[in-house]
Image: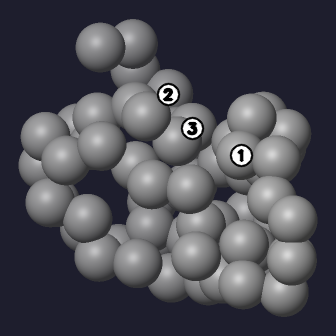
Amino acid sequence: MPNREYFFAGDKAPETGEYLCMPCAYKSKIKKGEKFPECVSCLVPQKKIDIEEVADDAFWEKVS
């Protein structure tokens, strides 16, 4: 896995920790090896969701 500071939905977490969704600041605990999800906080207010569009815009950053 490339060494980088941010991760997109579908990427595997390089380590267990708390990650922040950059568009909305929602925090989620993700275990090492789990795939990053589409952010539930970003998806909730939308009635009709284009997952591909959201996944392209959203990314996660490790905060702790």
Q: Please, what secondary structure does the residue beneath circle 2 have? A: loop
Which quadrant does the C terminus fall into? bottom left
- Tell me, yes or no, if residue 5 can be seen here: no
Q: Amino acid at mark 1?
A: Ile
43 left or right of 46 in image: left
30 left or right of 49 in image: left
Q: CA distance from mark 3 to mark 1?
A: 12 Å
Q: Which picture quadrant has residue 20?
A: bottom right
Q: How far from the left and from the top, in percent, is residue 35?
A: 30, 43
Q: How far from the left and from the top, in percent, is residue 5?
A: 53, 39
7 left or right of 1 in image: right
Q: Residue at x 59, y 67 (%)?
A: 39
Instruction: Single out the residue that lies furthest toward the top.
Output: 2
- Compared to residue 54, the image places residue 5 above or below, namely above
Q: CA distance from mark 2 to mark 3?
A: 11 Å
Q: Amino acid at mark 3?
A: Phe
Res 16 label: none
Q: Amino acid at mark 2?
A: Arg
Q: Please, what secondary structure does the residue beneath circle 1 have? A: helix
Q: Earlier in the sequence, mark 3 or mark 1?
A: 3
Q: Nearer the viewer, mark 2 or mark 1?
A: 1
Res 8 label: 3
